Image (spheres, rainbow, N blue to C red):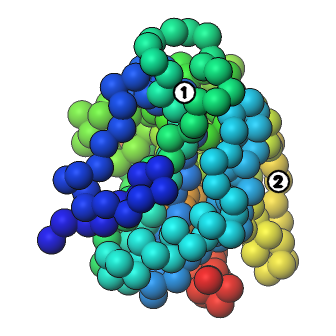
Amino acid sequence: MSRTVYVNGEYLPEGEAKVSIFDRGFLFADGVYEVTSVLDGKLIDFAGHAKRLARSLGELDMRNPISTDDLLEVHRELVRTNDITDGVIYLQITRGAASDRDFAFPADDVEPTIVLFTQSKPGLADSPTAKVGIKVISIADERWGRRDIKTVQLLYPSMGKMMAMAAGCDDAWMIEDGAVTEGTSNNAYIVKGDTIITRHLGHEILHGITRAAVLRFAREAQMKVEERPFTIDEAKAADEAFTTSASAFVMPVVELDGAVIGTGKPGPIATRLREIYLEESRKVAI
């Protein structure tokens, strides 16, 4: 069955959706994106994703073509039309399509391009992988410097995923100046004793919406949180490790560069945080 997608104000069958070959997202990766999870037919953390979208657009001096209220309605319509119970909604906004390829930004009257589509993922919150954990490798972080802007420049993270797959693993943690920045599509954490350690916010990492929620829930549960860089050696010696992201929520990490972390099984803190995040997020889903 063909999905209904949203392109520049229209709901279309996916086979009829088109954007210009001159679109700057295609030519220059000049665009931003967000991914919002859907659980039980409701949106998780929509407000946080909308706020970060506005920030990313502002950092790139890109015009927002849609209000938050209208964007929410588009999300809900796509969930309804595509009968999504569990899954994600992908949103992308680019600087639009000028009449030809040019490094300079187009004139102000060029409309941004906005695209949304759904991906159905039945049982998203009940991932079998979360019960056994994932294996990661470490790779050099060779991305551009403004990782806090959620752009569509995802070539190197894609390469990192492929490096991990070639090594028989699930993901890669990126290293810069001797410390972990983040995973290819997630924020990274270790647990030592009763303390959760994750890199502080800055230009070096994405300001994860799930990250913010999980850290808030951790503090509310009286867990200790330390925001600072950590090394691969620290991670290998940790009691637990995990990642957070919009579509995987809290995902335990049980092996890093072939070294078993902790017991080699999902630890109690990661497991509990996943439970808390899913429970609390469902309460306020819209």
Three-letter amino acid code of the residue under disc 2? Glu
Q: Is residue 263 above or below residue 201?
A: below
* Element type where label 2 sits in the image: strand
- Quadrant in which the N terminus is drawn: bottom left
| Residue hosting label 2 | 226
Q: Position of residue 164 (x, y in %)?
A: 33, 37
Left or right, 89 with respect to 103, comes to left
Name the residue type under label 1: Asp
In the rendered image, the quadrant that contains the C terminus is bottom right
Q: Quadrant of residue 157?
A: top left
Which residue corresponds to the image point at 36% horizontal and 31% vertical from the top-left? 20
* Residue 156 percent coordinates (x, y): 44, 26
With 4 as the anchor, is 188 left or right in this view? right
Position of 227 with respect to 139 (left or right) is: right
**Dot 2, how many residues are within 10 Å of its Cα: few (below 14), some (14-19), or many (20+)?**
some
Mark 1 surroundings within 10 Å by alpha-carbon count, few (fewer than 14), some (14 through 19), many (20 or more): some
- 205, 173: nearer the viewer: 205
Mark 2 against mark 1, which lies toward the viewer? Answer: 1
Residue that carries the numbered disc 1 in the rendered image: 30
Q: Position of residue 243 (x, y in %)?
A: 55, 56
Q: Is residue 127 visible?
A: no
Q: Which residue corresponds to the image point at 81% horizontal and 60% vertical from the top-left?
A: 225
Identify the residue at image location x=57%, y=73%.
73
Residue at 64% from the left image edge and 30% from the top image edge: 109
In this view, the residue in front, 69 or 269, is: 69
39 versus 257 height, above or below = below
Instruction: State how far apart marks 2 and 1 are (Cα).
Output: 34 Å
